């Protein structure tokens, strides 16, 4: 039995996931909690946030994030892809920085305008 706290809403339900019984989830107050518990144990994913270098003297770094969740085991590999990136200004909120990470269809995107 695995104990989790659901993070899909502020309620923070205390979930139990039974690995030996088809990953049955209990303790959830809504269907989202059941889905979260199952996915967190069988295939955890995370949204990754970071910053990348820019060529701007005023704003030497630009915040970025993935526009969806990627497999948790790929987080550090995704961060390493950002190390050598230097953005040429102007950069606009939503610009794709790295496209289709690990063939997931998820991109790193800028989360701020840097002009």
Image: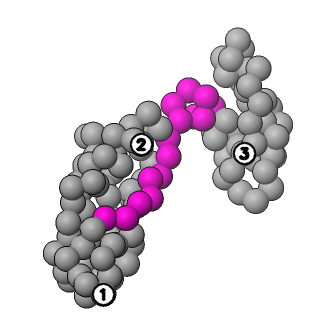
Q: Earlier in the sequence, mark 2 or mark 1?
A: 1
The residue depicted at 39 percent of the width and 37 percent of the height is 74
Q: Secondary structure at mark 1?
A: loop
Marks 2/1: CA–CA distance: 29 Å
Q: Which mark is residue 14?
A: none
| Residue position marked by numbered label 2 in the rendering | 75
Tag 3 and tag 2, C-beta contact below 8 Å: no
Percent across and percent down for residue 95 are: 26, 71
Instruction: Determine whether, in the image, residue 2 is placed left or right of residue 71.
Output: right
Residue tagged 3: 6
Residue occupying the point 74% across, 36% down: 4
Q: Quadrant of residue 76?
A: top left
N-terminal of the two: label 3 or label 2? 3
Q: Is residue 105 at least partly visible in the picture?
A: no
For disc 3, the neighbor class at 10 Å (few under 14, some 14 to 19, many from 20) is many
Question: In the rendered structure, which disc, 3 or 1, sits on the residue that comes first in sequence?
Answer: 3
Residue bearing mark 1: 58
Q: CA distance from mark 3 to mark 2?
A: 21 Å
The image quadrant that residue 9 belongs to is bottom right
Quarter placement of the N terminus: top right
Q: Is residue 49 magenta?
A: yes
Vertical relation: 28 (above or below) 92? above
Of the pair 13 and 113, the residue shown nearer to us = 113
Image position of 22 with respect to 76: above or below: above
The spot of residue 34 in percent (x, y) is 70, 38
Foreground pick, 69 / 23: 69
Element at badge 2?
helix
Residue numbers of the magenta segment: 38-52
């Amino acid at each position: 039995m695995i104990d989790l706290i659901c993070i899909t809403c502020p309620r923070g339900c205390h979930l139990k996931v039974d690995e030996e019984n088809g990953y049955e989830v209990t303790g959830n107050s809504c269907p989202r909690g059941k889905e979260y518990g199952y996915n967190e144990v069988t295939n955890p994913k995370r949204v990754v946030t970071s910053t990348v270098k820019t060529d701007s003297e005023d704003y030497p770094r630009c915040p970025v994030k993935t526009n969806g969740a990627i497999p948790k085991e790929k987080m550090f590999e995704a961060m390493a892809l950002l190390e050598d990136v230097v953005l040429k200004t102007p950069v606009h909120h939503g610009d794709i920085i790295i496209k289709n990470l690990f063939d997931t269809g998820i991109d790193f995107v800028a989360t701020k305008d840097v002009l």
